[in-house]
Amino acid sequence: MSASKEVSEAGRKYVLSRVADLLAVSTAPSDAPDGNFKDMLKSVEEMVESSTQYTDMLNNFLRGYDVVEDGSKRLFSSTLLFCQRKVADKKYELFMSTNDTGGEMDVRGAYVIRNTEINPKTNWPRPVSQKDVDLVQELSVGIIEVNKQAKTPMTFLDFHRQLLDNVYQPILRKQEKWGKATDAQREMFQTCIQEHSDKLEELMTEYVEAEKAVMPDPAYMKPLSQGMNYAKVAQDVKNVRHFETCVENWIGVAGRLIDEKPKHADSEPQNIPEEVGPLTELRWWKERSAKFVRLTEQLATPDVKVVVGVLVAARSVVYRQWQQVDASLTDASNEAKENVRYLSSLESYFDALEKESPSVIINILPALVNNIKMMYTIARYYSTEQHMMTLFCKITNQLIQACKNDIRQNVRGSQSAAHIWAQTTEADQLRALIERLQACVTLKKRYKDEFYRASERLALKASGPQLASLNDLHIFGKFDLFCKRVVKLVEIFETIEQFQSLSEYNIDGMKSLIDRFFDYVEDLKKKAAHDPLDQSTPTFDKAFMEFNKNIAELECSLQVFINSSFENITSTENALALLKKFQLILNRKTLRSDLESKYMVIFHNYGLDLETVQKTYDRQKGHPPMVRNITPVAGAITWARQLLRRIESPMQNFKENRSIMGSQKESKKIIRTYNKIARALIEFETMYMSAWKAAIANMKSGLNATLLIRNEGKLYVNFDLDILQLIKEAKALMSMDVQIPTSAKMVLMQEHKFKKFHGQLTHAIQEYDRVVSRIIPVTKPLMQRNFEILDSIIRPGEVSLTWTSMNIDGYIARVHAGLQRLDVVVTQVNNIVQNRIQANLKFISSTLLVNLPENQSFSLEQFVSLQEKHIKAQSELMDIKNCEVEKAADDVIDTILAGQKAAPDALCPGRSENEEEVLALKSHFNNLMFKAILTTTTRSLNLIKKRVGTRGNRTDFMQVGKPFFDVHVELSAPHVQLHPSLEEVQRAINQSANAVLKCSKYISHWLGVQETETNFFEKIAKNKEIVKVILLLTGGIHRLNKQVMDYLNSFKRYEYLWLLDKHEEYEKFLEQEPTLQMFEQELKRYKAVEDDVDGIQPSYGIGSLSLDTARFKSALKKEAQEWKAQYAKNLHQKASRDLARIQSQMDENEKALLNAIKEEDSLEDLRMMMDTLREIRERESEVDLLFEPVQENYAMLRSNDAQIPKDEEEQVGELWHHWRNLRSKAEVRADEISKLQNGFKTRLTREVDVFLGVVKTFRADFDEHGPMCEGIAPSEAMERLNKYQRLFEDHKRSWTTFQAGEELFGMPVHEYPELAKTEKELGLLEKLYQLYVKVIQKIKGYAETLWVDLKQGGGQGFVALVEEVNRFQQQAQRLPKALKTWDAFLELKKYIDDFLGLEEMISALAHPAMRERHWKNIMQITSHEWKLDEDLFKLGDILEAKMLNFEEDIQDVTMSAQKEADIEKKYKEIEKNWKDTELVLGEFKHRGQLILRGEETNQIKESLEESQLQVGSMLASRFVAPFRTEVSEWMAKLSAVSEKIGLWQEVQSAWVWLEAVFAGGDIMKQLPMEAKRFAQIDKTWVKIMTKAAEQKNVIGFCYENELLDLLPNLKDQLDQCQKQLQSYLETKRRAFPRFYFVSETVLLDILSQASDPTAIQGNIQSIFDGVTGVKFEKFKPAKGETGSGVIKITWLYSPEGEAIQLLEPVPCVGNVECWLLALVEQMCLTVKEVAKRCAAEVPTLQGNLRHFETCLKTYVAQISLLLVQILWTTDVQEFLSGPKSEQKQLREAADRRINDLKDMLVELTRTDLTKMDRINVETLITIHVHQQDVWRAPPGKGDTPLKKLRDGTSFDWLKQARFYFRPEKEEVIIQIADADTLYCNEYLGVKERLVITPLTDRCYITLSQALAMKLGGAPAGPAGTGKTETTKDLARTYGKLCIVTNCSDQLDYKAMGKIIKGLSQANAWGCFDEFNRIDLPVLSVVAQQ
């Protein structure tokens, strides 16, 4: 029953209906009725239901497993067979099986296959679905048939072949998951199954039955068997005619077999289908030969000879015909045998043609053709042109199929064409495909060459058959046509390969041509959609012609593109590089010829380049342009050398081209120009060097300055930059291989010293500033003396020490020592304050004095106990923390004072002298302690108030906050009450609040601090907030009393359950004589009560109380169940008794019907069976009245949840099924009895009479031919004894049976004396022959004993055999004397004696030292050989060798074996050590053991080297000869393993890095191919490491492991992944140029989380200068759109906290670079729009300057500053451009607004501003002060105040940074001199600005002019003077992004290239700090950009 519940009922019906359908319509045996579908379905269903075995089999099949007796599961077969077998004439029966037809040879049936997958959670097959739509996929059904009417003995093999082809192979083809098996292994497995099926089919052909000849009737043969001669028989015409008819039949059968022809025999050889290969030829001849053999065997019988003899005697005409046919039959049979012999010699070649690739087949073709040639010359029958043509055509067919399979890679069907085109997407696959195609063409050529070569060799022989006579057009025609198609494919694929290479170079403008090409390819795929390898399809040829036409047009376009690429040559080097690139790619002849002509065009342009270089030199030689941060002299020389390289490199290329240099007239002119320019550039370099050498002396004067200088209290290093310039110049020139003067070298030699001193002093000053900045303000008064001590140490550097002084090192050491002492004091003080004071104060503030977990309720006892323990523990802990803070405050004071005393020669005051500072510091920390205690007390009391406060009148158990106290509702009859009570709850709350308040009383007061209160408790108790909370907590619970009582009164409706007496009420119910319906009403009544109780809420909240009803509900349900149990118990007892009575009666009847009545059964059994049948018939009318009451009773019990035993449930459910089975069996038994009863007695009488005659005959035969006859051998006597014993046993069974029948029917009982006598004699003979057979069998059995079993224990196994043979010897001696003269006894004795003589020899050979080589020596000695395999070497081999004859020689061999064993032992020790050495693996990111641990692996490598030395020494020993091969192999193993481990470690390093990139995130989506490649790498790596974890042995795993052979490929794949990852990152950078400015780690972090836009928050500042965060908002989808909404960016946030709202929200959809680009654009548009609105405020401000405060609050800081600059520019511009008559008024108005704005800004600083607003106002003041200075009194000499100018053309005005808003462009314009620049609208946040000095103005003017001329700028000056900050400030002025790069020698040309590409694409500025630190090779590359 359990099985049927778990299976699919739909699947069950589907299986039965489909099987019935197939069996109803399938081809049945000729005499089997098919029937219709309904009848067949009924038969199938009855068959399944008739047997529990069949039912369970079907259920187990549908669910995939069965359950064994112990309850465990096991897999069930995935195949089920429903078969019909013949049981009688025209009668069939159905049966089921899981594997075969049960040995039946005449069956038909249907198979069902389950295709469900394995459930990964349970590792068991998924059950068949319940849905009809899934059953077709999950269940496969088909027909299978085996018919013995075919008259062949191989039908069983045929059945298994059908099973393979129709069942198992379809399953395997549908199987998708093959575990760890590779595709190659899967293909190999399926191929092996197919080969096995083919072998079965081939085996069947060998047993093919020929048409059987008719044999003569035995009646006609009888006279001949009685001795009548042929002549006499021939006189009878009737006999002769009968024999002639037989012979005529033989003639017909033989003639038809001789005339039989193979399939396609009537076709021309060249028309044989392609799928027909040479193996079909061999199989046909094998089948033909087998048929001849069968027919020959039939005609070789004696009866055939007799028939022929009679016909000869009768001189029959038929005999002469038979002679002719017999001769033809013999000749045809010989032909078949010979052809099979010759073709079988070629079978291995035919197999290779079918299975191998063309590259392998090429190598076997010579041998194949040569063998065919030899067969053609020597074969008797097969050497005909027809046979040869057929064979060669079939070989051609097979070669074509091999080529197609190799090209398709064994993909067949409709997918083959798609698979071929799919191989053209990847370059490696495409190249491999082309090579396979070319191999096919090579194969055809080799095939034809070998054929013609063989033909030529045969032609040398004048006589004999010639291959030249064969029609080679028919032989090679198909192959030629196929290869033409292959050549076309090669042309197509090579063209694809060329254009793929072209696309990889990313040549600008080439993309459209490449796209066109691939469009042509796609068009070709569509038009040639059929198999391109099918040479018979003309559609491909048409598509190919069109494709070639398109390619020709495309080549013309490509030619035009190439020409246009060289028309506008901007650089000769670029043109040459482009030309070289085209030459490498383009291989088509039409294109390469034109490329050569481009050299001359480039050479002419080179001449123009020379002229350009000449003009550039003449124009710039006075002021050579230089790259940033390069020294002047080196820069000028670099410029000259760069010009020289520009003309020199192309000239070197042109020299190699003779065609160009050969044109004398044009070449000489260009060469002369080249020489002239080169000479001028060399002279320029010499001139600059001379000038620099003369200026060296003046630069060295700066070494006499002091080391330090103090300005406005700040220290600076006083080092002349000219010295550094001299050093830089010298280094730069030396790096360029230029000789410099000795004086410069001397300075350069001291570079390290100067830089060291400069660095150390700079570091000291930085340390000084750092230490001062770290001092906590509250400790500064006490640390004043510490600073005075340090300043005294620093002062000599400001006064006396210079850069040439000798004691600078000591001075720096003293300064650092003083700084270190001060730093130690500051660090100690800060550590104490942070880690001991602030940490403890924070801990106390955050401490809660109560433990009130959220969402948790308490019982009252739990609450009181928990709070008492917690408050006590927290009080003690707070007191400890208080003492720690007090001690820490004292330690701070002591540390500061100790630092003052530690200073050398310092008279420092003590603690008493600093009493005021000490007291103030300690009081500060004491006040902080009070605040912390107050905070924790307030928080704790508030928490109690929050948790116990009343939340309302009522809440349910789903409320958000859980009530505080758990109060139980309990039934305490006769009342319902709470436990604990409300008064107890209130007391507990009051107690906890008082405990919290008193906690501070136990905290110690500080010593040395003056306070009015004696402890912290007094101050806290007076706090108003504390008092308020205490009052609120008192009495809060009592307000809930009314609600609680109302809730409890609601349960009075259940009072009767506990108030009434159960037994009294039940007795009253029984007095009513209740019916079944009354029982049901009572049970339902109490069941309803239980359901009602279940509906009561488990928890009811009233305020802070949670009323738990669990106990109350449990008590109620218990009461209701007790009531219900009274009624259910009685009802169950009655129903159980009735069920047991019915079941017992049916079981007894069924037991009686189990045994069927047969004819040989007794009459008593017949009588008992008749009684049972009568009883069943009588009960038929009562069964309904018996079953229905029982079933109704149990149904009622189940509906009321009564406890019913499982066995009773099953019995009730199967009552009717049990009865139907019983009735069916009774009907069957009744039919049987009716047939047997009538003829039982008659048959017994007849058989007894027959048996009497049989007994007499048996005895007579025994006397004449029995084992007691004299003169027979023992073996023959034994055979006779066995024969007659078997016959006697058969007769004895009949004897016993007949006697019992006679007794049953009352007949006389017969006696059989002959049988009694025979039984006695056989007993006597059995004694001797039993021992004889036993001994012979035992000794022969000993010969089969394996030697490995005998030699255990040094030959103890043989000793046991000897003991057993001794026992046989003793038994033989105890035989009677009469038996000892028999031959059997004598032969027995000889067997025993010979065996016992081998004991000593066996013991010697069983020594453990014996090896195979020793046994081979023994074989040579004894001249007897045997196999030494443990499973083959047996004792019989030794017995046959007769070793006793060679005893001495064998002893010498055994002695030698023992000596060699000692040497072998030493070798085994080394081998054993490595068996225990294992790889040590380490965990990797919780993924398991996936890496080799470094230290342990290195130790293994060292051990490998040591072992190699040891094995090498063993090889040198002279005793190692028997083991030399093994030791040499170990040497090879150790060497190979050492190499593998080294490579393994390299691959591991690369895998670990890439795993972090591809482990997750969106990069895997962006790089699917590389992610897939890495996933495959990762899979392989994990597979390797998993296998390594499973088999950790170093040698076992690392040596000749196919997995580790993948390591080189893994390394290559990892390198390719790294390359593609860099290419991917470059693509993202090109899409969003600002990615060039972030590190690869940050970029990978951004890209890996691209699917989550919010994840970019942490990296946003690396992309923007003034943005540290953005605001994401989720917008609902618009109407009509689907989806969950879009996340958009709406606000930008600066680092200072300023926010700006974007004009339009930026949707974060698509790739991250796309919406970041949109964010940048929207940011600029937003700033631009705000600037536009800001500019509109200028007229308002000119009339009302107070409006500026409103603007300051409205606009962001950047725009506010822009507004000030536009306002100032407008005022000054109006003044300068106004009428002269109004200039005075305009000047005064402008002057007034400038002053008012300054005053307004100053007033703002006095208000309460936020930090951000204050920075903004200070920045405005900084800029406005500069504006005011320029307006009134410019700081620079010679500058004129703007207010005194008369017009706007003055340079004093034009050189200022002027800001204008152009309404027509809606842009802000910044003008400096004549350079106009658009404001770039980059959001900058709230940035501070530099004070603008005259130097700043000059920098602004210079840089702006340089940028206007598309040049760069390089501010130079001493360190720390603001070069970088000035550049950044100018960028902020323009609203532009500025990227600052700190240069060093680690910055290579690739990094510089990234930065420059990013700057050029992002429209940003780049500021390269310390540019001169970059290596010169990198600088030269940068100079080219």
Image (tube, grey):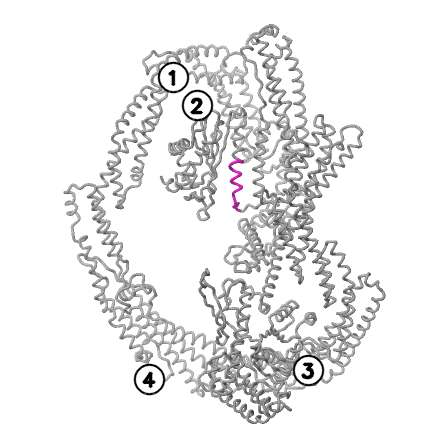
Mark with earlier residue (4, 2): 2
Which SS type dominates the magenta stretch?
Answer: helix
Task: Pick whichever of labels 1 and 3 is earlier in the sequence.
Answer: 3
Q: Which mark is residue 945?
A: none
Is residue 1512 a member of the stretch shown in magenta? no
- Label 4 to label 1: alpha-carbon separation: 129 Å
| Residue 165 is covered by the magenta coloring | yes
Seen in the picture, residue 869 relative to 793 is either above or below; the reply is above
Above or below 1590: residue 676: below
Whichever of labels 3 and 2 marks the residue nearer the N terminus, that label is 2
- Of callouts 3 and 4, which one flags the residue occurring earlier in the amino acid sequence? 3
Proximity of marks 1 and 3: CB atoms separated by less than 8 Å: no
Q: Which residues are magenta?
A: 164-179
Gap in Å between the C-alphas at discs 3 and 2?
123 Å
Where is residue 1074? Give x, y as percent.
17, 42
* Circle 4 Cα neighbour tier, 10 Å, few/some/many (<14 / 14–19 / ≥20): few
At which x and y percent is residue 741? 76, 79
In the picture, the disc for residue 722 is: 3
Quadrant assignment for the N terminus: top left
Circle count: 4
Labelled disc at residue 1012: 4
Question: Residue 1296 — which label?
Answer: 1
Q: Secondary structure at mark 1?
A: helix
For disc 2, the marked residue is 88
Looking at the image, the residue that sits furthest to the right is: 664
